Every structure is written in C-alpha cells, then in structure tokens.
Amino acid sequence: MTIATIQNVDIGAAHDGEAELLVTLEYGNGGRTQVTLDEFAVRTLLSSCKAQTPEDLIGADWALVRDALIASSERYAEHTRNE
C-alpha cells in the first residue's frame, strides 16, 4: 500500500538563489505536504524514477523522495568524516 505519492512539482529558488524542486506529496487520506529538494536530491530522484523531466515524477512513491533526501544529506556527512 502506497502511503503518499508525488502529485505536483514546481521550481523554486533557495535563499542562495539556486534552483530547488518543490514536490507536493498527497497522502491516501487527501492530506498534502510540500518537500523541497536541492539539486543533488533532484538528480537522485530523477535517476531512481528513470525520469527525464520533473513532470515525469508525478505519481512516484514518496519513499523515493525520502531516499533522495537521505542521499543528499549523507553526502555532507561523508564530507565531514573525511576532514
């Protein structure tokens, strides 16, 4: 059973002016939440979904968004460990 899926994607600007992807997740009960993905997370998500464009992500399971966020976060943790 899928808990949530991507229902919408938009491009936004981060505080540093870099582009971000704003992903709207919709839950089975109709609730919605928006998640912001940085460039690394977006590339990871596009790859895991075999998507060519952000619009191709619509309908994807939320777990793929979670995994992309984890991958993005872990790249900073690994950098810190190597210093």
Image (cartoon, rainbow, N blue to C red):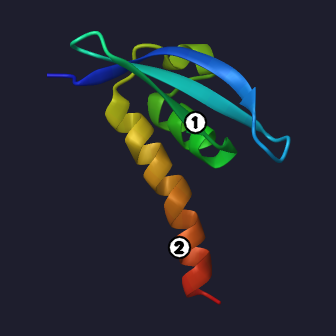
Q: Earlier in the sequence, mark 1 or mark 2?
A: 1
Mark 1 surroundings: few (<14), some (14-19) or many (≥20) residues within 10 A? some
Is there any visible trace of residue 48 in the rendered image?
Answer: yes
Residue 27: % across, % down: 28, 18
Which mark, residue 55? none
- Assign the C terminus to one quadrant of the image: bottom right
In this rendering, position of residue 20 left or right of residue 73: right
Give the alpha-carbon distance from disc 1 to disc 2, as whole Å.
19 Å
Residue 1: % across, % down: 14, 22
Location of residue 70 by image quarter: bottom left
Mark 1 falls on what kind of element?
strand
Instruction: Give the answer, above or below, for where 3 lies relative to 31.
Output: below
Give the number of callouts: 2
Identify which amino acid the numbered label 1 is placed on.
Thr
Which mark, residue 36? 1
CB-based contact (under 8 Å), mark 1 and mark 2: no
Residue 55: % across, % down: 59, 13
Identify which amino acid the numbered label 2 is placed on.
Ala
Instruction: Give the answer, above or below, for where 69 lies relative to 13.
Output: below
Which residue corresponds to the image point at 22% horizontal and 14% vertical from the top-left?
28
Mark 2 falls on what kind of element?
helix
Instruction: Give the answer, above or below, for where 32 lies relative to 71.
Output: above
Which residue corresponds to the image point at 43% horizontal and 36% vertical from the top-left?
65
In this rendering, position of residue 1 left or right of residue 55: left
Which mark, residue 77? 2
Q: Nearer the viewer, residue 42 or 9?
A: 9
Q: Work out which residue is located at the far left of the displayed protein and give it.
A: 1
Which residue corresponds to the image point at 49% horizontal and 55% vertical from the top-left?
71
Q: Which of 7 and 40 is in front in this view?
A: 7
Instruction: Give the answer, above or below, for where 46 lies relative to 28.
Output: below
Which residue corresponds to the image point at 48% horizontal and 20% vertical from the top-left?
24
Q: Nearer the viewer, mark 1 or mark 2?
A: 1
